[in-house]
Image (tube, helix red, strand yellow):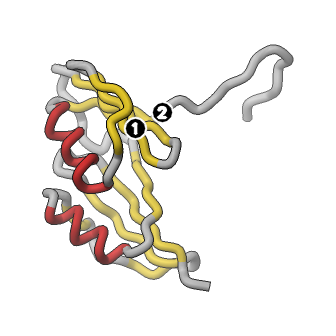
Amino acid sequence: MLSYHPGMSARFRHVMLLVNDLPKTVDFYQQAFGLEVRMRSPIWTELELDGTTLAVHATEDRVEAGNGVHLSFEVDDIEAMVTRLVDHGAGLDGEIREASFGKVAAIVDPFGHRISLTQRAES
């Protein structure tokens, strides 16, 4: 647990994916989720959705797909989003499941990163 120290503060900056193919990865997240490019350079792109930043960083090192990074998106229509993601090259890992809060689906993007989709139950 972090403790408070006067004069010190922290703010969440971004979630970062290390990738071997920056243009394809950025294109996938733009096209599949509608993320907007906030900043772009030859080795770094920042995508944004609702105030959260996904930083995509190019590397020549071997990238271990699914290396503990897990992206989670809440969607209005989980079935439609799964179809859209699969159409963009992602894979559905298992089936869409019912949970106490609504529906959940596990997705693997075309580069091996894990994505969780959730849809809240209607009240």
Report the amino acid beneath label 1: Leu
Please provide percent x and percent y for residue 32: 25, 56
> Is the Cβ of the residue at disc 2 closer than 8 Å to that at disc 1?
yes
Q: Nearer the viewer, residue 79 or 96?
A: 79
Q: Residue at x 45, y 81 (%)?
A: 98
Q: Residue at x 18, y 65 (%)?
A: 86
Instruction: Give me the disc on residue 54.
Output: 1
Q: Nearer the viewer, residue 77 or 97?
A: 77
Q: Residue at x 39, y 42 (%)?
A: 69
Assign a secondary structure to mark 1: strand
Q: Residue at x 31, y 31 (%)?
A: 56
Please provide percent x and percent y for residue 46: 36, 31
Assign a secondary structure to mark 2: loop
Distance between mark 2 and mark 1 Cα atoms: 6 Å
Left or right of 109: which side holds 104?
right
Left or right of 19: which side holds 99?
right
Q: Which residue is mark 2?
A: 14
Left or right of 62: which side holds 81?
right
Q: How many marks?
A: 2
Q: Quadrant of residue 12?
A: top right
Classify mark 2: residues with Cα within 10 Å, few (<14), some (14-19) or many (20+).
some
65 vs 91: above or below: above
Please provide percent x and percent y for residue 78: 37, 73
